[in-house]
Amino acid sequence: MPESPSDLAGRILKHFTAVHLEVFLGDPVCNPKLRVEVLEEALAHDTPTLVLITPWTINGLAFPPDGTLPDTLTVNRRSLPVFVTDIAGIGVVHSVNLVANTATLASPEAARSAARALSGDFCHAIARAATYRKVFTEQRWPVTAVHVPPQCAGDLMVVAVKRGRPRVAQGIMAAALSGPGGIYTGKVIVVDEDMDVFDLDTIMINLVQKLHPVRGITPYFHQGSPLFPFADLKERLEMTGPQLLLDCTWPMDWPIEIAVPPKASFTEAYPKDLQEKVKGSWTKYGFKN
C-alpha cells in the first residue's frame, strides 16, 4: 500500500530543507525571500502527489505505486518532462518542474499562489495517467504512452502501442471504453510507439499520413456522454452518442523494411555525422542556438 501524501510530505520537507542549507544557501540562483515548503498533498487515483516549493524552483512530485509514469505530462497546456530520481530515505520520486525560475516571486505567499494555481492541473494529469495505465496494464495491452490532450476537454485519447499484436487498436478501444472515463472518451487515436503522443503536430501527421480512410476508421456505439458537442438531442437524452477509433498504426502484414515508408525528418533522413555537423554550425547559419 502506498505511503500517504501527508507522511511523504514530512520526509520531503526534511530532505529538501537539508539540501537548501547544505547546498543552495547563499547561491545566487536562489530567491532569498523563499523557504522550502510542501503543500497541496493529494492522492491522484492511486498515486500520492504534492507540490514542493524551494528557493530555486517549484516542482510537482508524484509517487506511483508501480513506479511508472509517462515521460511527459501536460500541465496548464504545457508538455513537461517527467524526471525520475531515487532519493535515499525516500525512494523513487517522479518530478515535474512547474515553475523553473522563482527569482521573480516577491514573497512566500506569491510562491504558494503560483504552486496552488498549477497543483490542480498537475494532480489531474497524474490521475489521468494512473487511471488509464492501470486499465491497460491489467488487460495486458502493449501500451507505451497515453495522453488525454487538455485542449480537447477530455474527449480525445491518444495511445502509443508496441508493434506485434494483431487488432491491437480494437483492443485498446475496448479497454478505453471499459475504463472509468470511458463514457466521456469520444475519440481514440492509436499510434505506433515511435510517435510522440504528447505533441499535437505529431498527432496531426498521424491523422493525415498514416490513417487509412476506410480500414483505419471504426465507429463504436457504446454508451456516449451527453456532453459530446456533436450529439443531437436524441443522442444526448439517451446517452447514445457514437465514439470513434482512429487506427494510425502500420498494418501487421506490412514488412517494415519494404512497405513502411521512412520518416522524412531531420533525425531519420540524414546520417548522424551530418546531423552533428549541421547542429554544430547552427549559429553560423544565422539561427538562434
Image (cartoon, rainbow, N blue to C red):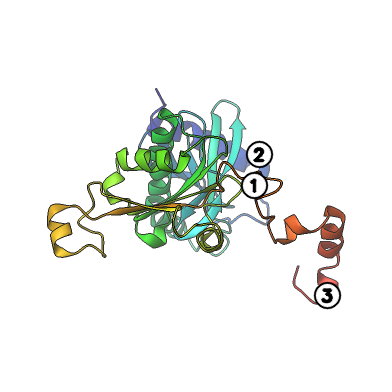
Q: Secondary structure at mark 1?
A: loop
Q: Is residue 79 above or below residue 255?
A: below
Quarter of the C terminus within the rendering: bottom right
Give how far apart the Cα atoms at labels 1 and 2 are: 7 Å
In this rendering, would 226 be left or right of 182? left
Identify the amino acid type marked 3. Answer: Tyr
Q: Amino acid at mark 2?
A: Glu
Q: Which residue is mark 2?
A: 22
Label 1 Cα crowd, 10 Å radius (few <14 / some 14-19 / many 20+): some
Residue at 57% in and 35% down: 164
Q: Residue at x 37, y 33 (%)?
A: 46
Labels 2 and 3 touching (C-beta < 8 A): no
Q: Position of residue 157 (x, y in %)?
A: 41, 51
Q: Nearer the viewer, residue 90 or 209?
A: 209
The quadrant of the picture occupied by the N terminus is top left
Whichever of labels 1 and 3 marks the residue nearer the N terminus, that label is: 1
Q: Which mark is residue 25?
A: 1
Q: Is residue 49 left or right of residue 270?
A: left
Q: Marks 1/3: CA distance?
A: 41 Å
- Please, what secondary structure does the residue beneath circle 2 have? helix
Corner quadrant of residue 6:
top left
Answer few, some or many: residues within 10 Å of disc 2's Cα (few below 14, many 20 plus, some between 14 and 19): few
**Residue identifier under label 3:** 285
> How many other residues sit within 10 Å of disc 3, few (<14), some (14-19) or many (≥20)?
few
Q: Position of residue 119 (x, y in %)?
A: 41, 51
Secondary structure of residue under mark 3: helix
Residue occupying image coordinates x 81% and y 68%: 282
Q: How far separated are the C-alphas under marks 2 and 3?
A: 44 Å
